[in-house]
Amino acid sequence: MAVLPYKEEQLGKKEQVAKMFDNISRRYDLLNHVLSFGVDIIWRKKAIKMLKPEQPNLILDIATGTGDFAIEALALNPEKVIGVDISEGMLAVGRKKLAKMGLTDKIELQLGDSEKLLFSDNKFDAIIVSFGVRNFENLEKGLEDMYRVLKPGGTTVIVEFSKPTVFPFRQLYNFYFRYILPLIGKIISKDNSAYSYLPESVQAFPCGEKFLEIFNKAGFKNTICRPLTFGISSIYVGQK
Ligand SMILES: C[S@@+](CC[C@H](N)C(=O)[O-])C[C@H]1O[C@@H](n2cnc3c(N)ncnc32)[C@H](O)[C@@H]1O
């Protein structure tokens, strides 16, 4: 069964996820950095480094949110990064940020669904997704459409939460993630559900080897998983 942010509502996962991110968009960046003690920034940097040998020219950032991963991707010196997301609220915050940073000619943010990408086949040199795939309504469909728009020989890099296994880190982390984080998230974001949905969706997400199986099934080759910070997050890399 799908994990939903607003369990009492009739809307499907995609609509609920878009609504949730619209609700928390103005506090999203702040909460990200506070709740992860800034480590999320390091994870995105590490993931982008994996693309260094490829020197991609045109990059698609799926589930771009407020654009942080797209901004990080500029370290690769591409001609253009296109970011797509289903939350207009997140994109609006991202567009303001890009304008402030003078990056609107380099990064373009568009409303778009990972499961129905409005791009032609074999278009992008690289595709990146940070903390997005866990929120897809249909993970298989999302990965298949990413594969479709990636150029043959192109690389996809995905960062997503996983589950740490090492004692006692796992126990300490679980306590923080299940009890402390939802409370701080609720107070700052003013959304009662968003930061309870986070640990629940991570728990339900197929991480590690299970994710690689689905990744391979979508068509990706040479797939690898690299755990980060005791396995709190993982980087997945695959090629077309
Ligand atoms: C946790 S945020 C990650 C944002 C950004 N990538 C980051 O690293 O901060 C997840 C984002 O995924 C988006 N999302 C969820 N399902 C999506 C889909 N099917 N297509 C596009 N974006 C989606 C949400 O709207 C949200 O902005």
Image (cartoon, rainbow, N blue to C red):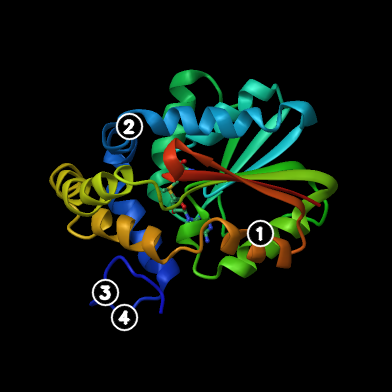
* Circles 1, 4 touching at the beta carbon (< 8 Å): no
Residue 202, label in figure: none
Asked if residue 33 lies left or right of residue 163, the reply is left
* Dot 2 or dot 4, earlier in sequence: 4
Q: Amino acid at mark 4?
A: Gln
Comes first in the chain, label 2 or label 3: 3
Residue holding disc 3: 7
Q: Nearer the viewer, mark 3 or mark 4?
A: 3
Q: Position of residue 62 (x, y in %)?
A: 58, 49
Provide the residue designation for mark 1.
117
According to the image, label 4 marks what residue? Answer: 10
Marks 3 and 1 close (CB-CB < 8 Å): no
The location of residue 199, given as percent across then percent down, is 31, 56
Amino acid type, callout 3: Lys
SS assignment at label 4: loop
Q: Position of residue 88 (x, y in %)?
A: 43, 51
The residue identified by callout 2 is 33
